[in-house]
């Protein structure tokens, strides 16, 4: 018993020694494993950082791009910030504000192609003699908000070979020159031989322009149908659509939301309200507009009428009945430059509650003389009625024809420029005047992104012989001028030989003016008194 007990004590340490050794080695292995698992990801992270810093890891977007490809996603390489990081120099902070890189990189390399599956497809038609400085901002602004196709009926500057070749190179643009052949074709058109427009025939200046616009709109309907368009809009190149109330400031979304039962929509017009007399580019220098009667509470409109008109003949300087868009459908026809109609039915027409057309009228001091130079009327109250439909145009023409430059400038400030800050702020608070910056921002972004210069640079260097001869013929016949609108031409001469076979002239002129919607002034105080009495 004693021996066994002693034997147990002798061998006990021998049995316990291998057990503690095993535990110790196990703990050591676990510690090493944990250390390895900790150091491995840290080492890999450090290695990745070093390789990336030295340029050893390719960017997936460049790795899978075609060889030699430089077409990057919008904003990847065009912003001044990204170029500052890549080409870091001590002066980069100073150059950010004046970087040559576009500050609006989204437009960089945007082709503005007309080929699109998005609906509805929207076309805009215009009659213009303006230069590229006005047409390109006007056109690309409307491309940005959703228009795809443009029918440009050109004369004057717009028809010159230098301008026309650039316009024809732009996707979605169709240029139509006012040639003798075109005038003969329009003289045989349905409109020319109907009664609703004839009250405007054989009169100069604005009346003549109104007839040309209507005849051109008739042709544009046919071209729009052939091009698969859903909507057609007639605008002048001093007008910009303002799709307020639509998601993403989209004209396409605005018209997409119009019920199918609606045939036409009216954009009430807002009128530019300039604050200086030295404006050169109205689209990017004018942010204040006078709101339309339809978008102002009636008590505010008439309550502030005197302060809003500032002694002018009406609330607006020129027209106040807006412009409209029409759904392309059978029997569509123009109804003057401001409206559309249908031969077979009374169109279902609605008016937008927020969207508008911004009219930049008399925004430059030179607009006074350009109107004077294109119309051959005498500066008398009686004679200007033959040229102009609206009273303010008549007054402006007389001033531009009879006053000195200093007198004209004084008149321009009194009647057009908003110099009185107190009145201006009061009308802004009341909602008569409003600030709109979106068109200014879009067009400035397009300019800074190089869109306009790119279009000019990429245009073909020469026109085809046939097109060149057409433009020369057009330029010679229309006597290119520096004015914003079409030069004065006696469109009435087209059909004078046919006057005896047309019954149009036998109908009372008042009936024609009622049928074709002319440019109309907004309601005046007399209209308010009439409505109150009723």
Image: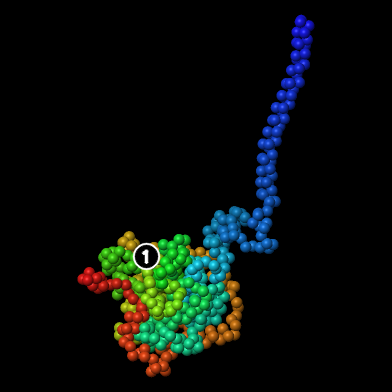
Residue 430 seen from this side: yes
Q: Residue at x 69, y 44 (%)?
A: 47
Against 472, residue 270 (above or below) is above
Q: Position of residue 436 (x, y in %)?
A: 41, 63
Quarter of the image with the C terminus is bottom left
For label 1, the crowd category at 10 Å Cα-Cα, with few meaning under 14, some 14 to 19 and many 20 or more, is few
Quadrant of the image occupied by residue 483:
bottom left
Q: Nearer the viewer, residue 145 or 13?
A: 13
Against 146, residue 510 (above or below) is below
Q: Position of residue 355 (x, y in %)?
A: 40, 66
How many marks the image carries: the answer is: 1
Whether residue 89 sits left or right of residue 487 in the image: it is: right
Residue of label 1: 353
Quarter of the image with the N terminus is top right
Whether residue 472 sits left or right of residue 205 in the image: it is: right
Q: Nearer the viewer, residue 46 or 150?
A: 150
Q: Nearer the viewer, residue 331 or 183?
A: 331
């Amino acid at each position: 018993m004693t021996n066994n007990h002693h034997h147990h004590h002798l061998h006990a340490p021998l049995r316990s020694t291998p057990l503690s050794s095993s535990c110790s080695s196990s703990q050591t292995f676990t510690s090493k494993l944990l250390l390895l698992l900790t150091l491995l990801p840290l080492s890999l992270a450090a290695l990745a950082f070093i390789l990336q810093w030295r340029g050893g890891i390719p960017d997936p977007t460049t790795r899978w791009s075609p060889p030699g490809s430089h077409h990057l996603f919008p904003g990847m390489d065009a912003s001044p910030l990204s170029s500052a990081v890549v080409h870091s120099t001590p002066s980069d902070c100073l150059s950010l504000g004046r970087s040559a890189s576009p500050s609006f990189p989204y437009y960089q390399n945007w082709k503005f192609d007309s080929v699109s599956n998005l609906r509805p497809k929207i076309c805009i038609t215009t009659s213009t003699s303006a230069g590229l400085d006005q047409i390109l901002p006007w056109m690309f602004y409307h491309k940005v908000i959703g228009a795809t196709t443009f029918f440009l009926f050109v004369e004057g500057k717009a028809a010159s070979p230098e301008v026309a070749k650039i316009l024809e190179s732009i996707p979605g643009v169709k240029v139509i020159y006012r040639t003798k052949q075109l005038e003969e074709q329009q003289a045989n058109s349905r409109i020319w031989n109907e009664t609703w427009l004839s009250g405007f025939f054989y009169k100069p200046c604005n009346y003549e322009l109104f007839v040309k616009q209507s005849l051109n709109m008739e042709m544009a309907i046919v071209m729009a149908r052939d091009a698969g368009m859903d909507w057609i809009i007639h605008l002048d190149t001093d007008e910009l659509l303002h799709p307020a109330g639509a998601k993403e400031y989209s004209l396409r979304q605005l018209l997409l939301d119009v019920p199918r039962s609606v045939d036409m929509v009216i954009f009430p017009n807002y009128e530019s309200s300039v604050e200086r007399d030295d404006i050169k580019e109205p689209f990017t220098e004018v942010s204040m507009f006078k709101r339309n009667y339809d978008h102002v509470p009636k008590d505010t409109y008439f309550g502030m009428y005197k302060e809003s008109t500032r002694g002018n003949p009406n609330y607006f300087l020129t027209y106040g009945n807006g412009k409209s868009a029409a759904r392309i459908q059978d029997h569509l026809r123009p109804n003057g430059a401001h409206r559309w109609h249908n031969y077979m039915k009374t169109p279902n027409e609605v008016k937008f509650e927020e969207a508008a057309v911004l009219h930049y009228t008399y925004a430059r001091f030179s607009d006074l003389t350009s109107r004077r130079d294109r119309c051959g009327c005498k500066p008398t109250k009686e004679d200007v009625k033959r040229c102009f439909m609206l009273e303010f145009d008549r007054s402006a023409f007389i001033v531009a024809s009879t006053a000195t430059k200093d007198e004209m400038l004084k008149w321009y400030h009194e009647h057009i420029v908003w110099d009185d800050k107190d009145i201006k702020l009061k009308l802004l608070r009341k909602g008569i005047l409003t600030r709109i910056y979106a068109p200014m921002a879009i067009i400035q972004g397009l300019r800074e992104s190089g869109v306009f210069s790119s279009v000019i640079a990429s245009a073909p260097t020469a026109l085809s012989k046939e097109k060149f001869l057409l433009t020369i013929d057009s330029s010679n016949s229309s006597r290119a001028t520096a004015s914003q609108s079409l030069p004065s031409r006696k469109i009435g001469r087209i059909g004078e030989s046919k006057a005896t076979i047309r019954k149009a002239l036998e109908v009372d002129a008042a009936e024609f003016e009622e049928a074709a919607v002319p440019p109309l002034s907004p309601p005046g105080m007399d209209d308010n008194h009439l409505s109150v009495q009723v």
